[in-house]
Image (cartoon, rainbow, N blue to C red):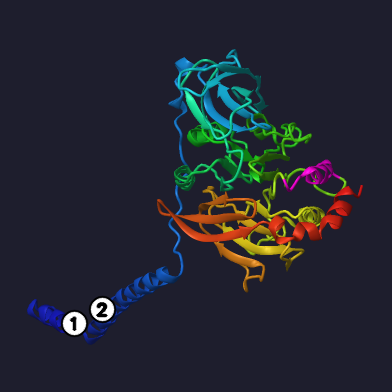
Amino acid sequence: MIKRMKERLKKKYIVVSSKQLLLLDLTFTYHMELKLLLILKLLFAALAAESEYVRPLPRKTLTIPWDSISKSHSSYPQQVRISLAGEKHMRVTWITDDKRSPSYVEYGTLPGRYDSIAEGEYTSYNYLLYSSGMIHHAVIGPLEDNTVYFYRCAGKGPEFQLKTPPAQFPITFAVAGDLGQTGWTKSTLDHIDQCKYDIYLLPGDLSYADCMQHLWDNFGRLVEPLASARPWMVTEGNHEEENIPLLTDEFVSYNSRWKMPFEESGSTSNLYYSFEVAGVHVVMLGSYADYDVYSEQYRWLKADLLKVDRKRTPWLLVLFHVPWYNSNKAHQGAGDDMMAAMEPLLYAASVDLVIAGHVHAYERSKRVYHGRLDSCGAVHITIGDGGNREGLAHRYINPQPTWSEFREASFGHGELKIVNSTHAFWSWHRNDDDESVKADDIWITSLVSSGCIDQKTHELRSTLMTP
């Protein structure tokens, strides 16, 4: 090619010096090297893709139009969602712009035919210059297990339908934390919607409103298609802690909008509570409520664990936001204080599975206690990968700790199918572009069937009953 260029230059009667020809040679060589490097990079990337997952690019924050609810229908329910509210009962929550809208729910087992009605309550809050709509809560029931109900809020707007959880095994939980409102959030929700689940568990960081209160409203509209059909059981994360000293209550938005069954479980705070469903006792703890050995949450947890009947609920799950076992470089040590106070209680009670968020990645541990492998310890799962706007936590500590079984920095969701009193199947599904790809799975044997509970009976009583 160089020779042909020299000949063309000579034909045009242009005088080319030896230095110019040398520069031409170097320029050509440089461009060829760039092309070669590009080809090699593409080749290595293709080879790496076969052995290591290559993450897709980030996605933008979703924008939900303000006029998605017609101004002429200010009394129409919006942001409708449901949660468990004690045995055989559901709490229906919705918001209206009309502050005179009544708080009641009509419901029944046939579409358009409501043979029951439940009166509710309402609240609202102010946050700096923002004033919320009327936030309504109504508890419906008693309801039949594993049954579809049709319901309407305040006698207006569209009809919704929900399905109650089963009374017995099997039962399936969908799990993802740190949701936010991005394109990846939408992908995660779409994938969850495709799986056959009974209850959604969210270990903190819901809307990522971060004091921008209209984003709470956007989030409510975003999740309504799923949250109005299956119970959403949530606990708080750091992004729910919207504290402005001397001006705002730090959890006013979360507590007003996402009321959980804390009173039904003997708790004095919406930041921690428990519930039972189909042979599973689930404890939702608060990483951002006091948790030391002198705290109300610690006292409540001891009492709650002491009441658990493993013959009636052989599976015991615990969720909170900040992980205790984390080999990612993000948030290292953030859960150490809570772990020091509460891990002995969880171990004494033979908790099967602990689920957390906060770290924007996925990790699953082996059974572990006090930093060491222990066949009677809990399996810890970090799943703060729902799709938040802050992105993924890519960096891990190496070498991988012995207690860490699987880890990957990708968005996704988990599915926990508890098959019977002895076995459960856990799977984690990464968001690969717009496809849900199962990347990790394991069968988990309950501690009830392993003999651990019998071994720790004395330890359980002495630890949980000590003042």
Span highlighted in magenta in the image: 295-311
Q: Amino acid at mark 2?
A: Phe
**Marks 2 and 1 in Cβ contact (< 8 Å):** yes
- The furthest residue to the bottom: 18
Give whichever of 307, 25 is nearer the camera.
Answer: 307
Compare marks 2 and 1 and give the one earlier in the sequence: 1
Task: Using residue 353 as the reference point, say whether residue 150 is left or right of it.
Answer: left
Q: Decide whether the magenta segment is chiefly helix, strand or loop.
A: helix
Q: Residue at x 49, y 26 (%)?
A: 160
Choose top left, top right, bottom left or bottom right for residue 169. top right
Report the side of 415 relative to 261 (left or right). Answer: left
Which mark is on residue 92? none
Residues packed near mark 1 inside 10 Å, few (<14), some (14 to 19) or many (20 plus): few
Alpha-carbon neighbours of circle 2 within 10 Å: few (<14), some, or many (≥20)?
A: few
The residue at 63%/66% (across/down) is 404
Q: Which mark, by number, is residue 28?
A: 2
Q: Is residue 54 magenta?
A: no
Furthest residue in direction right, as rendered: 467
Q: Is residue 296 on the magenta stretch?
A: yes
The three-letter code of the residue at mark 1 reads: Ile
Percent of width and height locating residue 436: 44, 53
What residue did someone put label 1 on?
A: 2
